[in-house]
Image (cartoon, helix red, strand yellow):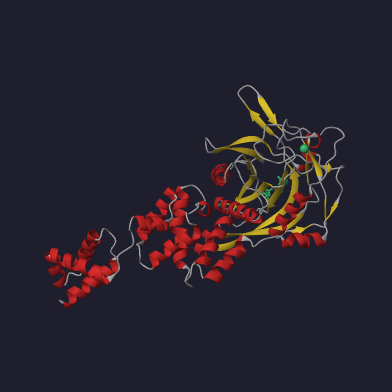
């Protein structure tokens, strides 16, 4: 029997407020353990939480960008469980009245748009961090009470690849919104994965497992690929799956059982008595809506329409907000209507250099800035230097902090296109290569390339090959 994977993702994203969700502790990363904790986030008796306004605004902004309906009323609940990193023994979360419901995110998959429905978006605080050492474990409560947003999809995802695309698109959206630094290494973006199989063509949901502990999008993809195979084998042998939580292990590239899946009733949810029911004001929502910038899919459309770019080039250019702004600056500075030369440079040599240097194209810091870059590209268009030379000039410029034009001048790299000079070199080459000349005259057209090559050598690579060839042909054909 053929099985179809059914996947739902729960993404936790830390919103970049200056202070925590319900207290005034700072949210800076990497500070001395337990230096950013107070009676409220540690749950001391008598302390009371107060909702951080910026947290609510960022949450609404994100939910709106995910096309969700902001609920008129939302409230906080206590999710009760014991764990050493949870000093209050409960987490403030949202249960039956979440901030927002029913949205969607469109992703591009195999040149088609697929809509992934969002089930709910709710706010919840983070727990602390347990640091395990050889014979003891340490606790750091700096993360306790950090403002998280949980974004839960419907089970609309059907392959590891789609899950990867969804996460990439979501991260891109969050970066555009400027609501989170989305750094998986710092734990600002975490993802739990729910996966089950069902016979292809059927619609009832199978028994799912929940995967945790993936620390990259690739980890999510790999864990799904592994888990699909594991479930498939069990089902094919007529076995039964158990609903459980499994841990992804990066080392062995496999999932290991962690615990049986707990259910909502295990958490004894009840309304947080120290926070009121919140009513969302339509006016404020409208105000927040206005702060949403141009989003990735809108930018993509505009790049295609306004600049006549292809969809694939545009996609590369908008993949990152800063790079998109940089690309747009270059495109606008490009003097010609046809933007292809500059776009080809952006998605060609510039991406190549940025990959080598493990940074974004906007962080390459080209000496002389976009002005120099545009000039460099322009000189290849005007055939003052060859494309190959221009690429190595760019590379050298990045290494040495000299501007491209400085390098071209110092090394005297401009191609020789002036006819007089090239004519002289052509005459010499013709004199020195009687064999190729006679080959050419007898109809071996290829022989011309050898002569062009000789001209290139003589000019130390500076002859414009196209002009050189034209001049050679003219001399030889009129001889
Ligand atoms: P739980 O109560 O176990 O947390 P939820 O209904 O809240 O489950 O769903 C959590 C996530 O799991 C959602 O993204 C949802 O789409 C997904 N999901 C639910 N049931 C299944 C299933 N049978 N197979 C795959 N994913 C599922
Ligand atoms: Zn605090
Ligand atoms: Mg759930």
Q: Is residue 1 in view?
A: no
267 in relation to 112, above or below: above
**Residue placed at 49% from the left, 67% from the top?**
334
Quadrant of the image occupied by residue 444: bottom left
Q: Quadrant of the C terminus?
A: bottom left
Q: Where is residue 258 in the image (x, y as percent from the top left)?
A: 64, 34
Task: Determine whether 90 is above or below 305 in the image.
Answer: above
- Locate residue 236, reporting x and y percent: 55, 45
Question: Which residue shows up at 47% across the image and 51% down it?
Answer: 354
Residue situated in front as seen by the camera: 397 or 327 = 397
Q: Which of 103 and 427 lies nearest the eye of the viewer?
A: 427
Side of 254 relative to 92 (left or right): left
Q: Position of residue 391 (x, y in %)?
A: 39, 56
- Pick the residue in front: 341 or 320: 341
Q: State left or right for residue 119 relative to residue 270.
A: left
Look at the image and tell me whether residue 357 can be seen: yes
Comparing 211 with 219, the one in front is: 219
């Amino acid at each position: 029997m053929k099985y179809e994977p059914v996947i739902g993702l729960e993404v936790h994203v830390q919103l970049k407020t200056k202070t925590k969700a319900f207290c005034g502790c700072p949210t800076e990363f990497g500070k001395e353990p337990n230096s950013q904790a107070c009676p409220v986030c540690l749950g001391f008796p008598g302390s009371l939480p107060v909702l951080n306004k910026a947290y609510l605004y960022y949450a609404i902004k994100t939910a709106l960008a995910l096309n969700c309906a902001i609920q008129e009323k939302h409230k906080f609940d206590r999710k009760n469980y014991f764990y050493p990193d949870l000093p209050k023994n409960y987490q403030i979360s949202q249960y039956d009245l979440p901030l927002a419901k029913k949205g969607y995110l469109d992703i591009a998959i195999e040149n088609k748009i697929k809509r992934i429905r969002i089930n709910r978006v709710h706010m919840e605080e983070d727990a602390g961090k347990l640091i395990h050492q050889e014979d003891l474990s340490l606790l750091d409560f700096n993360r306790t009470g950090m403002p998280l947003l949980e974004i839960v999809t419907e089970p609309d995802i059907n392959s590891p690849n789609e899950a990867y695309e969804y996460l990439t698109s979501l991260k891109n959206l969050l970066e555009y919104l400027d609501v989170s630094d989305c750094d998986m290494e710092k734990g600002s973006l975490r993802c739990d994965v729910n996966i089950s199989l069902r016979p292809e063509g059927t619609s009832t949901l199978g028994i799912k497992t929940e995967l945790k502990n993936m620390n990259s999008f690739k980890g999510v993809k790999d864990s799904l690929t592994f888990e699909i195979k594991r479930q498939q084998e069990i089902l094919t042998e007529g076995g039964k799956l158990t609903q459980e939580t499994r841990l992804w292990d990066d080392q062995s590239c496999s999932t290991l059982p962690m615990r049986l899946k707990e259910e909502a009733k295990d958490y004894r949810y009840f309304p947080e008595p120290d926070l009121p029911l919140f009513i969302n004001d339509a006016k404020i929502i409208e105000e927040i809506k206005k702060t949403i910038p141009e989003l990735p899919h809108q930018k993509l459309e505009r790049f295609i329409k306004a600049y006549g770019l292809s969809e694939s080039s545009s996609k590369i250019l908008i993949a990152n907000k800063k790079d998109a702004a940089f690309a747009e600056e270059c495109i606008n500075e490009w003097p010609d209507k046809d933007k292809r030369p500059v776009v080809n440079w952006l998605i060609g040599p510039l991406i190549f250099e940025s990959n080598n240097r493990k940074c974004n194209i906007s962080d390459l810091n080209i000496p002389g800035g976009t002005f120099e870059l545009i000039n460099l590209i322009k000189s290849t268009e005007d055939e003052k230097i060859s494309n190959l030379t221009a690429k190595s000039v760019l590379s050298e410029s990045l290494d040495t902090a000299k501007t491209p034009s400085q390098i071209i001048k110092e090394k005297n790299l401009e191609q020789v296109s002036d006819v007089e000079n090239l004519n002289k070199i052509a005459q010499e080459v013709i004199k020195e290569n009687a064999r190729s000349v006679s080959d050419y005259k007898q109809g071996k057209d290829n022989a011309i390339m050898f002569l062009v090559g000789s001209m290139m050598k003589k000019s130390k690579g500076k002859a414009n090959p196209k002009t050189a060839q034209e001049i050679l042909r003219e001399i030889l054909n009129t001889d």
